[in-house]
Image (cartoon, rainbow, N blue to C red):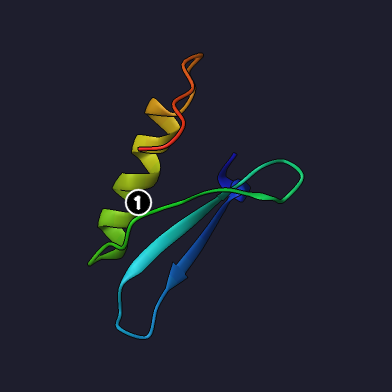
Amino acid sequence: MAGWYELNKNDKGQFSFVLKAANHLVIGTSQMYKTAAARQTGMESVKTNGPTTVIKEGA
């Protein structure tokens, strides 16, 4: 599952990640984080809270 995350850093020094499906299509993008450690915490949250049978569309 670790390979399904693409780690990014923009030109302002902010961090983010992209979640990809097994077929490499993007299925989610994160918010911007101030640190790489905060991004890692966000990824861990997705790993913990993501697997669910409840699907919510639109926010």
Would you place residue 42 above or below residue 50 in this image? below
| Quadrant in the picture for the N terminus | top right
- In screen coordinates, is 9 left or right of 6? left
Would you place residue 21 above or below residue 7 in this image? above
Would you place residue 6 above or below residue 57 in this image? below
- In screen coordinates, is 3 left or right of 23? left
Residue at the spot 35% in from the left edge and 51% down from the top edge: 40
Residue closer to the observer: 58 or 15: 58
Furthest residue to the front? 58
Tag 1 secondary structure: helix
Would you call the spot at circle 1 few (<14 residues within 10 Å), some (14-19), or many (20 or more)?
some
Judging by the rendered image, the residue that carries numbered circle 1 is 40
- The kind of residue on which mark 1 rests is Gln
- In screen coordinates, is 1 left or right of 16? right
Q: Position of residue 45 (x, y in %)?
A: 34, 36
Residue at the spot 49% in from the left edge and 63% down from the top edge: 7
